[in-house]
């Protein structure tokens, strides 16, 4: 009963005209930012941090939260229409969403993305309301061995599922892991693999690599290989989902939500792991008839599941942030900084010391999800019209947005050259059927996995048995082995 009374008080606070205005502005701004490649919510919230000196705490946190989950909605738009992820969490959406757009089903892809985001965000917000302290307590019990095995599971799943060849997938993964090693060692502080290039000391920006491999390579590939071909895109007949597409989408939404929420609660790589795992799950569970659509004309489950997982994970990051003061994403870390600017300490006491702010923030998640659905669904038809833009100005625009977004991160001309170089690498990978997504996964999770592995070995005094002695890590290793071995056993059984 106390929870519902607190939540009602939160709705009263968040429902004031000024707070509703900040929520709407944050959602609208976040959606627009999600559409732009390279300019993610972390960069935007960081740029807007100075407003904490002018706006009262509750309003600014509602505003920043609106930007955060609004960007997750908006990021799916360019992923689906242009194969240009606005955020790293929406990279998986591009895999099937862009193919759906090319086959004339952009409206259905955008609709399942928006509705799935709403469903997942709402369910995740209810779970935050009810179970935040319990889930945070469970997350604290996981140690470095469990986190490392969790990331190992993500590596093997992504590499084995994406692309036609597991070998090519693993090769792409190791490229990403190698890129992730560039820069300063997280534990020792030793600079490594920079080749004397000063710009590499802080590592290679994930957004830069994502924009290079997805957006720039898409533009270059079209210029080099498809510039003279006639577009084979079918006519768009509807911007809504058919009855069959609804039937295929809702189980994927539920599974994606269930996968995303636990990952958002633990510091294991943000929304990237659950989106990739959701994609792998949907592909494995698809019927033979629908499985053929994956990687060809685009399967709607491959959009619905990852989008739900993404938004569920984004909402769940508030659990460790508010109850433990632990940010599990870059944007959450900046939100923590905003709280500290007001002299508010996130942690177990926050629900007592700043109860009004916390419950108003949670209530704003319910309000923001409705706002985002209202904003996004009517605009589906408008976004689909992007497909009618001629190729030359369309891809020129992508290059301009990519250049502005990447240059805006550090104002470095070197980053632009690196982005172009990665774009050329992306063209070669696409030409020879190497999946690009494992590169991003390796880059994001590689440094964290390395740090967790070294911490785990320290706990085990240098013995690898530490991963086998803990039940959770042992279970995860068994799952990893099954992911690698099961497909080959099934293939051998079919041949026999």
Image: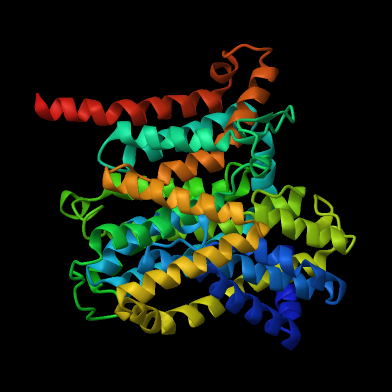
The image quarter in which residue 100 lies = bottom left
Q: List x then y, in percent, for residue 439.
A: 45, 42
Q: List x then y, in percent, for residue 47.
A: 72, 67
Q: Up-down: is 82 above or below 370?
A: above
Along the line of sight, the residue nearer the viewer: 374 or 469: 374
Q: Up-down: is 495 above or below 412?
A: above
Which residue is pictured at 25% across the width and 50% down the height? 286
Q: The C terminus lies in which quarter of the figure?
A: top left
**467 sits left or right of 478 in the view:** right
The image quarter in which residue 196 lies = top right
Q: Up-down: is 258 above or below 358?
A: above
Q: The N terminus lies in which quarter of the figure?
A: bottom right
Which residue is pictured at 29% across the width and 74% down the height? 241
Q: List x then y, in percent, for residue 368.
A: 60, 75
Number of marks present in the image shown: 0
Along the line of sight, the residue nearer the viewer: 31 or 69: 31
Which residue is pictured at 62% across the width and 65% down the height? 68
**290 sits left or right of 451 in the view:** left
Q: List x then y, in percent, for residue 405.
A: 57, 64
- Residue 285 showing in the rendered view: yes
Along the line of sight, the residue nearer the viewer: 188 or 463: 188
Along the line of sight, the residue nearer the viewer: 220 or 33: 220
Q: Looking at the image, which residue sits at the far bottom?
A: 17
**282 sits left or right of 24 in the view:** left
């Amino acid at each position: 009963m106390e929870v519902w009374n607190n939540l009602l008080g939160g709705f009263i606070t968040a429902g004031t005209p000024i707070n509703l205005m900040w929520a709407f502005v944050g959602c609208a701004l976040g959606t627009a930012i999600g559409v732009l490649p390279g300019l993610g919510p972390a960069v935007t919230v960081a740029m807007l941090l100075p407003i904490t000196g002018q706006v009262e705490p509750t309003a600014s946190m509602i505003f920043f939260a609106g930007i955060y989950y609004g960007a997750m909605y908006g990021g799916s738009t360019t992923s689906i229409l242009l194969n240009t992820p606005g955020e790293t969490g929406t990279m998986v959406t591009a895999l099937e969403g862009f193919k759906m757009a090319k086959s004339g089903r952009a409206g259905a892809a955008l609709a399942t993305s928006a509705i799935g985001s709403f469903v997942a965000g709402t369910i995740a917000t209810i779970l935050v309301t009810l179970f935040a302290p319990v889930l945070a307590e469970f997350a604290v019990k996981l140690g470095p061995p469990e986190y490392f095995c969790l990331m190992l599971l993500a590596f093997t799943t992504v590499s084995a599922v994406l692309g036609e060849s597991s070998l090519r997938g693993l090769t792409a993964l190791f490229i990403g892991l190698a890129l992730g090693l560039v820069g300063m060692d997280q534990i020792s502080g030793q600079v490594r693999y920079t080749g004397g290039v000063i710009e590499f000391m802080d590592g290679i920006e994930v957004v830069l690599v994502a924009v290079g491999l997805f957006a720039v390579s898409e533009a270059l590939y079209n210029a080099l290989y498809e510039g003279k071909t006639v577009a084979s895109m079918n006519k768009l007949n509807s911007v809504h989902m058919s009855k069959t597409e609804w039937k295929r989408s809702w189980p994927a939404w539920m599974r994606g939500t269930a996968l995303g929420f636990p990952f958002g609660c633990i510091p294991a790589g943000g929304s990237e792991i659950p989106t990739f795992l959701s994609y792998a799950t949907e592909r494995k569970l698809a019927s033979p008839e629908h499985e053929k659509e994956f990687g060809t004309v685009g399967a709607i489950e491959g959009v619905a599941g990852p989008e739900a997982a993404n938004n569920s994970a984004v909402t769940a990051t508030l659990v460790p942030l508010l109850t433990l003061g632990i940010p599990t994403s870059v944007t959450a870390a900046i939100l923590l900084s905003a709280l500290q600017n007001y002299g508010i300490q996130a942690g177990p006491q926050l629900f007592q010391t700043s109860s009004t702010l916390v419950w108003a923030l949670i209530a704003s998640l319910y309000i923001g999800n409705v706002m985002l659905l209202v904003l996004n669904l009517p605009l589906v038809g408008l976004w689909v019209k992007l497909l009618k833009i001629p190729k030359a100005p369309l891809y020129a625009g992508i290059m301009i947005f990519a250049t502005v977004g990447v240059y805006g991160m550090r104002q470095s001309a070197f980053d632009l050259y690196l982005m172009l170089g990665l774009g050329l690498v992306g063209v070669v990978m696409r030409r020879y059927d190497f999946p690009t997504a494992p590169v991003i996964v390796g880059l994001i999770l590689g440094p964290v996995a390395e740090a967790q592995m070294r911490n785990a070995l320290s706990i085990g005094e240098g013995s690898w048995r530490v991963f086998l002695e803990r039940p959770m890590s042992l279970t995860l290793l068994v799952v990893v082995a099954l992911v690698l071995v099961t497909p080959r056993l099934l293939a051998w059984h079919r041949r026999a």
